[in-house]
C-alpha cells in the first residue's frame, strides 16, 4: 500500500485520472442498477394497472347490464299496464270512431317489441315471466276488443233501465238470446226474435246510436259472451302474472341484497413499498 501511495504521490496527474475513471464507472454501475430496479418496478406497475383496468371494465359492464335490465323491465311493465287500462276503457267508453281500438292495437304492437328486447337481455326466469304476462295481457285485450263495445252499450241501457222503451228493448234482447241458445228453436224463430230485438233497440235512438244497437244485438247473441266474473278473472290473471314478473325481476336485480361495490384488488405490494418514499414509521 505504501508503494502505491508513494507512486501516486510522485504521479499526481495519474491519480487524478484514476479518481475520475472510478467516478465514471461508479456512475455507470449505479445507473445500471437503478435502471434495472426501475424496469422491474415498471413491469409490475404495468401488470397491476392492467389488472385494475380489467376489474374496472368488468364492474362497469355489470353496472351497465343492471341498469339496462332495470330500465327495460320497468318500461315493459308500464306498457303492459297501459295496454290493460286501454282495454278496460273499451268496456267503459264509446268507441264509434275506432280511436280507442287503434290505441289498443298500437299499444299491443309496442308491447310485443319491448318483449323482444327483454328476451335479448333478461335472464331466463324473467323471460318466462314476460311471456306469461304477454299472453294474459293479449287475451285481455282481445276480449276487450270483442266484448267491450257491446258491454258498454249494455251499460247505457242499465243507466236508462227505468224508461219503458229501454225495458222493452232489454226484454226483447233477452228473449232473442234465449231463443238463440234454445236447441229446439228453429232458424225462423231465431230470425224473428233477432228482428224484434233490433226494432226495439232502434227505438232507443238517438240515446243509443245505430252502431251501438248493432253491438247490443251481437253482445246478446254471443253464446260465448264474457260474463262479469270472466272479466274479473281475466283482469286478476293479468295482475297475478305481473306480480310474478316483478318478483322475478327483483331476483334478477338482487333487490333484496345489500351488495357493496367491489374494490379493485391491489397487489404487488413489494414493488410499491420498494418505490414509495420512506415514512417516519419506516425510518424508525
Image (tube, rainbow, N blue to C red):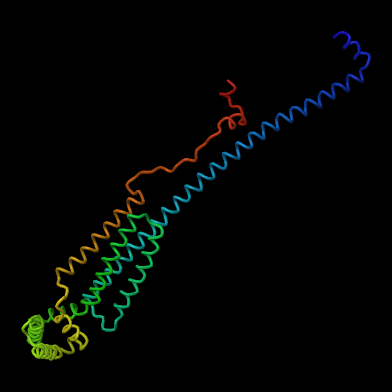
- Establish if 148 lies above or below 115: below
- Establish if 90 lies above or below 23: below
Residue plotted at (67% across, 31% down): 37
Give the x, y percent position of residue 202.
Answer: 15, 90
- Establish if 200 lies above or below 61: below
| Residue at the extreme left | 184
Q: Is residue 129 left or right of residue 180?
A: right
Residue plotted at (56% across, 39% down): 48
Asked whether the viewer can see residue 122, the reply is: yes
Residue 24 in which image quadrant: top right
In the rendered view of the protein, which quadrant contains the C terminus?
top right
| Residue at the extreme right | 10
Give the x, y percent position of residue 89.
Answer: 24, 73
**Which residue is at the front of the view, 195 or 26?**
195
Give the x, y percent position of residue 237.
Answer: 22, 63
Residue plotted at (36% across, 70% down): 110
In the rendered view of the protein, which quadrant contains the N terminus?
top right
Q: What count of labels does the image hold?
A: 0
Residue plotted at (19% across, 83% down): 215
- Establish if 261 lies above or below 80: above
Q: Is residue 46 left or right of residue 232?
A: right
Give the x, y percent position of residue 111.
Answer: 34, 67
Asked whether the viewer can see residue 167, the reply is: no
Residue 173 in which image quadrant: bottom left
Amino acid at each position: 500500500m505504501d508503494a502505491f501511495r508513494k507512486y501516486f504521490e510522485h504521479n499526481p496527474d495519474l491519480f487524478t485520472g484514476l479518481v475520475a475513471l472510478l467516478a465514471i464507472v461508479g456512475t455507470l454501475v449505479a445507473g445500471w442498477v437503478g435502471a434495472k430496479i426501475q424496469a422491474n418496478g415498471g413491469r409490475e406497475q404495468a401488470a397491476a394497472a392492467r389488472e385494475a383496468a380489467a376489474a374496472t371494465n368488468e364492474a362497469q359492464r355489470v353496472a351497465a347490464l343492471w341498469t339496462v335490465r332495470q330500465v327495460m323491465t320497468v318500461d315493459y311493465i308500464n306498457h303492459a299496464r297501459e295496454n290493460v287500462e286501454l282495454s278496460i276503457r273499451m268496456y267503459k267508453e264509446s268507441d264509434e270512431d275506432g280511436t280507442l281500438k287503434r290505441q289498443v292495437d298500437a299499444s299491443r304492437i309496442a308491447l310485443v317489441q319491448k318483449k323482444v328486447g327483454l328476451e335479448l337481455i333478461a335472464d331466463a326466469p324473467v323471460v318466462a315471466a314476460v311471456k306469461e304476462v304477454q299472453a294474459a295481457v293479449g287475451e285481455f285485450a282481445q276480449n276487450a276488443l270483442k266484448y267491450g263495445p257491446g258491454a258498454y252499450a249494455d251499460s247505457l241501457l242499465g243507466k236508462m233501465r227505468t224508461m219503458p222503451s229501454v225495458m222493452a228493448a232489454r226484454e226483447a234482447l233477452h228473449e232473442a238470446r234465449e231463443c238463440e241458445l234454445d236447441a229446439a228453436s228453429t232458424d225462423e224463430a231465431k230470425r224473428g226474435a233477432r228482428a224484434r230485438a233490433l226494432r226495439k233497440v232502434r227505438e232507443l235512438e238517438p240515446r243509443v246510436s245505430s252502431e251501438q244497437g248493432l253491438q247490443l244485438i251481437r253482445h246478446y247473441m254471443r253464446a260465448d259472451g264474457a260474463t262479469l266474473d270472466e272479466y274479473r278473472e281475466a283482469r286478476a290473471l293479468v295482475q297475478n302474472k305481473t306480480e310474478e314478473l316483478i318478483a322475478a325481476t327483483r331476483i334478477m336485480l338482487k333487490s333484496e341484497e345489500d351488495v357493496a361495490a367491489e374494490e379493485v384488488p391491489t397487489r404487488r405490494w413489494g414493488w410499491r413499498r420498494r418505490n414509495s418514499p420512506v415514512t417516519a414509521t419506516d425510518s424508525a
